């Protein structure tokens, strides 16, 4: 995998470190939880994971910047460049706090605005997903047990499995009725939430995943995995990539229809 082999190997090392820290605190009786200014929870595990990964990156990639959910953006010790690692130490913190095993560490490498490496590690599920630009997407417990993954071939919305996070955000942007109409139209709908719906799209188990409001650290690692598995990933306006603050991820065949149904394509109001 010329160009990204070393970066992907490093992402796995980072994930191993994150898994060891987060699993040691999962369901811990002395887990410390506090609310951030946006009223979302942060735990001592979130902070410890991000600190550890920043330390490793500072030593291993001194020319790369880092953006993390808890610590914000930091320039590379060697000076600014086009490469930036993007980290969500625990995606699904509310699940983590309640003892639900659907949470993960998200690790991405971006070159400019494009994610070129993505890794999602969900140690409580015993599963990891990863991809690098131009080299396909894989899943397994670890690299030695990797399987190539591919999106589904479903072509009709009536046959589709549709996934979302929750309905509150769609109500806030005035698209709740559109969402409910889609949910009535599909074969099946479920709210798996956070990273997991996107990974199910990449594996072909789910055909569509949508969310109306997200941050870059929520998205950057997911994009290469979905697209390298053959899927399509845009924001609600149809713009590719993780920069739009929202997400529609599909198997590709259903993308234009679901974008028209729940998105805000450029030039269209309402």
Image: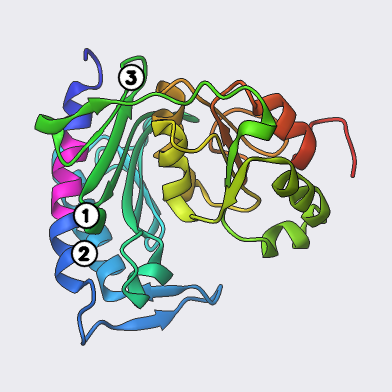
Q: CA distance from mark 1 to mark 3?
A: 22 Å
Q: CA distance from mark 2 to mark 3?
A: 28 Å
The residue drawn where x is 36% and y is 37% is 84
Q: Quadrant of residue 108?
A: top left
The residue drawn where x is 76% and y is 53% is 180
Instruction: Give neighbour class at mark 3: few <14, some 14-19, many 20+ (Cα, 10 Å).
Output: some
Question: Left of 255 or right of it: where is 179?
Answer: right
Confirm whether residue 266 shows in the render: yes
Q: Earlier in the sequence, mark 2 or mark 3?
A: 2
Q: Residue furthest right?
A: 269
Q: Secondary structure at mark 1?
A: helix
| Closer to us: 217 or 170 | 170
Residue underneath mark 3:
136
Residue underneath mark 1:
123
Residue 53 in percent (x, y) is at: 21, 52
Residue 185 in percent (x, y) is at: 74, 41
The residue drawn where x is 73% and y is 28% is 257
| Closer to us: 158 or 228 | 158
Q: Secondary structure at mark 3?
A: loop
Does 78 appear above or below 190? above
Residue 147 in percent (x, y) is at: 23, 27
Residue 102 in percent (x, y) is at: 35, 59
Magenta-highlighted residues: 10-18
Find residue 12 and name its label: none
Q: Quadrant of the C terminus?
A: top right
Q: Are marks 2 and 1 in contact (CB under 8 Å)?
A: yes
Find residue 22 and name its label: 2
Query: Main SS of the magenta segment?
Result: helix
The residue drawn where x is 20% and y is 44% is 57
């Amino acid at each position: 995998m010329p160009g990204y082999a070393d970066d992907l190997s490093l992402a796995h090392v980072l994930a191993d470190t994150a898994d060891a820290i987060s699993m040691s605190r999962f369901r811990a009786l002395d887990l410390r939880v506090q609310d951030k200014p946006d009223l979302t929870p942060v735990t001592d595990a979130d902070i410890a994971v991000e600190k550890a990964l920043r330390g490793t990156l500072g030593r291993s990639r001194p020319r790369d910047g880092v953006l993390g959910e808890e610590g914000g953006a930091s320039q590379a010790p060697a000076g600014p460049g086009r490469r930036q690692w993007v980290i969500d130490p625990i995606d699904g913190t509310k699940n983590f706090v309640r003892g639900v095993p659907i949470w993960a560490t998200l690790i991405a490498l971006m070159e400019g605005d494009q994610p070129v490496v993505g890794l999602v590690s969900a140690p409580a599920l015993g599963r990891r997903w990863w991809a690098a630009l131009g080299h396909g997407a894989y899943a397994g417990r670890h690299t030695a047990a990797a399987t190539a993954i591919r999106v589904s071939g479903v072509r009709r919305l009536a046959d589709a499995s549709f996934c979302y996070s929750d309905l509150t955000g769609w109500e806030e942007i005035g698209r709740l009725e559109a969402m409910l109409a889609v949910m009535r139209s599909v074969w099946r709908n479920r709210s798996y939430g956070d990273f997991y719906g996107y990974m199910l799209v990449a594996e072909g188990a789910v055909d569509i995943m949508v969310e109306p409001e997200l941050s870059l650290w929520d998205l950057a690692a997911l994009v290469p995995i979905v697209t390298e598995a053959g899927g399509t990933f845009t924001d609600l306006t149809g713009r590719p990539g993780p920069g739009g603050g929202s997400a529609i991820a599909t198997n590709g065949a259903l993308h234009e229809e679901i974008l028209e149904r729940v998105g805000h394509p450029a030039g269209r109001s309402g």
